Image (cartoon, rainbow, N blue to C red):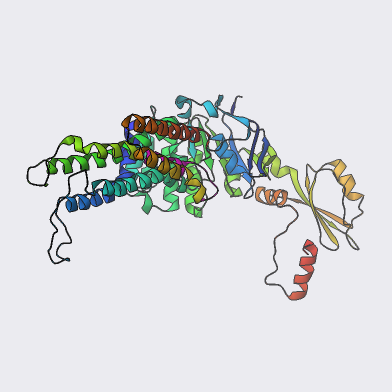
Amino acid sequence: MTDVIRTFRLTKHYDTRRVVDCLNLQVQRGQVYGFLGRNGAGKSTTIKMLMGMVQPDSGEVELLGEKVSAMCPKTRERIAYIAEGHPLYNWMTIGEAVRFTRAFYSNWNHTLVEQILDHFELSRKQKLRRLSNGQRAQVSLALAVAPEPELLILDDPTLGLDTVVRRDFLESLIQIIHRKGRTILFSSHILGDVERVADRIGIMVDGVLRVDCPTDHFRESVKKLVLDFPGPAPEAVDCPGLVNSWNLGSQLELILVGYDEAQRTAVEALQPRSIEIIDLNLEEAFIEYTRGRKRSLPLFAMEESRHDQSIGDQGIA
Amino acid sequence: MIKALAIKELRESAGLMALASLGMVWALAGLMGVNPLRYLSGGYVAPDQSIAFVNDSFATWASVLVGGLAVALGLKQSAWERGRDTYYFLLWRPVSRRVVFGTKIIVGVFLVVALLAVAIGIYGWWASIPGKKPAPFEWSMTFSAWKLALALPLIYLGAFLSGLRPGRWFGTRLIPLAGVFVWVFFASAVPYIWLFIPMLVLGYFGVLVAISYFVETSDF
């Protein structure tokens, strides 16, 4: 298998903040790679560096075996990019946008564009400024796939779309994937979408790629353990593969990666009354893996005493 | 593809061009003695004693209107796309950035020079009709106007560079434009054409090198 996307120690700072830190990313031909991370984790900056829109402070990017900084137009024809928000020229009609984009490509599948536009019931005479977010996404997709690209890079393509449009968009994307084993890298906040489409995921946390593995493997690796104690739960836990822990009074919640014999022994050494092992779906696994020490605040409908107790649990001063 | 890029730039510049053209028509009408507001001033029109291009207000109007177009167009062509994120759509097309920005600049310079050239042509043709002005007309009298036509594209490029160049706030981003204004002012004040031309060439060279640098190295 050849690497279609390859970065080597890619690093970017904004002022003194390191937004992408020594990123080594490899995506192989035919893979659908879900690129995940919380807001500000460095996903968009990474994608912009992949596309040459942002210059890295250090490191290199190769797409289809060619350095992005010196990529020839012929290679660029084989790569499609849909930026976040589906930027298009609002003054154009859909027909004008198709004609404008077509002018740049030697290989343009006009039948495919027509099929996609017809499928989504988009008139060629509609002005882009009058389209909904979903329709703009559909036009972007049609324009992106028309040159029959080998590699598609999509920055949060379903952002702002309603559930039905998102499902339609993903169905189209899946159909596109099935054509000639294309490679797709896409970032998203919607884990359900990623779970449906991606066969491998990467998770960025504070600019660092913390996870790079098959989607199923990640989901199966992250476990939540709820330890129940007869008295107060211990504050500190020393356990290999521990991502996070929360003391909830007499309970201790642990998020562990790759739960195995060594971890079981370490957990049992705490002598809890019971141990509950909870399997997580991708969304839960992602949330637990990335949210850090802060927990959500499910407090608003609770009585004051419980409120105080919960705040105490979170360790918020 | 260059044709598609050029048509896009022309379409996006059409509004500003129309506004500047209307202003220029108004100014030329005034210079030709057709005062659209004369009814407001009781219908009185002062006798015209000016000599076309020599001591009339053509250069002032042209500087304000075509200079204004140059600044607005330069900023719009470079900063507007950044503001709307359309650079992400445009710059990933299989064409080099030099071609994309080169086409933008050629269209922009063409529009600025074309507006001024048409205005010089129309006003010169009118002034050459005997009896229209109280002085004989020679085309050599348009020399100062053509000097302006050589200098205004530099203002346009300064504005383009300001829109392209990253800056912490708008004031510092306008430094190239302000610098070019000063340079053009001094170049225009030089009475010798043999010095005026090299000064302009130097200005063009510097600004184009800077644009080329930011086109290749800027974050979009």
Q: Is residue A4 above or below residue B111?
A: above
Residue drawn where x is 89% and y is 46% of the image: A266
Task: Check if residue B141 falls in the magenta segment.
Answer: no
Q: Residue furthest left?
A: B131
Image location (x, y in percent) of residue A136: 42, 48
Could one spot residue B159 in this view of the protein? no
On the rendered structure, is A280 left or right of B151?
A: right
Q: Nearer the viewer, residue A81 or B94?
A: B94
Q: Is residue A246 above or below residue B139?
A: below
Could one spot residue A172 in this view of the protein? yes
Image location (x, y in percent) of residue B95: 42, 30
Specify start and end residues of the magenta stretch as a single range: B154-170
On the rendered structure, is A187 left or right of A128?
A: right
Task: Check if residue B163 falls in the magenta segment.
Answer: yes
The quarter holding residue B207 reads top left
On the rendered structure, is B121 left or right of A22?
A: left
Numbered disc total: 0
Q: From the image, which quarter does the N terminus of chain B lie in?
A: top left
Image location (x, y in percent) of residue A172: 47, 42
The quarter holding residue B142 reads top left
On the rendered structure, is A238 left or right of A17?
A: right
Residue drawn where x is 15% and y is 62% of the image: B38
The quarter holding residue A6 reads top right
Image location (x, y in percent) of residue A107: 39, 28
- Main secondary structure found in the magenta portion: helix
Q: Nearer the viewer, residue B104 or A117?
A: B104
Q: Nearer the viewer, residue A48 or B149?
A: B149
